[in-house]
Image: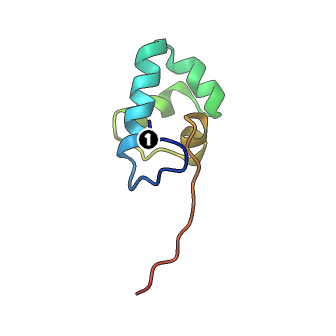
Amino acid sequence: MPGCNEVIEGDAEVLAALRDRVRRRGESKRFAHEAGLSAGAISQIARGYRPPSESVARALGFRKISRWVRA
């Protein structure tokens, strides 16, 4: 998992953290409850059928930031 204030690009690290957490705990239902989603939604995200939601990322210890980029 990224260190404190490390910026990541894309969803790959969030997905890896989700898969690792579910695999270690073996409880997608429990994590789903923590993230405020159904176990089915967590399964779809973990399998790559849906992008990770902000609530999933937050439950894994990530936070979303915005940046300005010069065009």
Q: Residues within 10 Å of mark 1 (few under 14, many from 20)?
A: many
User: Which residue: 56% across, 19% down?
Assistant: 29
Residue 58 position (above or below residue 70): above
Residue 23 in which image quadrant:
top left
Give me the residue at 57% from left, 48% from top.
54
For residue 39, side relative to residue 20 (left or right): right
Identify the residue at the far front of this view. Answer: 4
- Viewer-proximal residue among 19 and 71: 71
Direction from residue 33 to residue 70 in the image, left or right: left
Residue most extreme to the bottom: 71
Residue at 44% of width from left, 15% of height from top?
24
For the residue marked with disc 1, what is the amino acid?
A: Val
Where is 4 relative to 33, above or below? below
User: Which x, y percent locates residue 50?
Assistant: 41, 44
Estimate the x, y position of residue 31 in percent, counting from the top left.
57, 24
Instruction: Tell me the colour scheme of the image.
Output: rainbow
The residue lying at 42 percent from left, 37 percent from top is 45
Q: Determine the secondary structure under disc 1.
A: helix
Q: Where does the N terminus fall, quadrant-wise?
A: top left
Q: Quadrant of residue 49?
A: top left
Name the residue tied to disc 1.
14
**Can residue 44 be seen in this snapshot?**
no
Is 38 drawn above or below residue 8 in the view shown? above
Please state which of residues 27 and 44 is positioned toward the viewer in this rendering. Answer: 27
In terms of depth relative to the viewer, which is nearer, 17 or 29? 17
| Quarter the C terminus occupies | bottom left
Q: Nearer the viewer, residue 57 or 7?
A: 7
Residue 9 in view (yes/no): yes
Which residue in the rendered view is the most extreme toward the top? Answer: 26
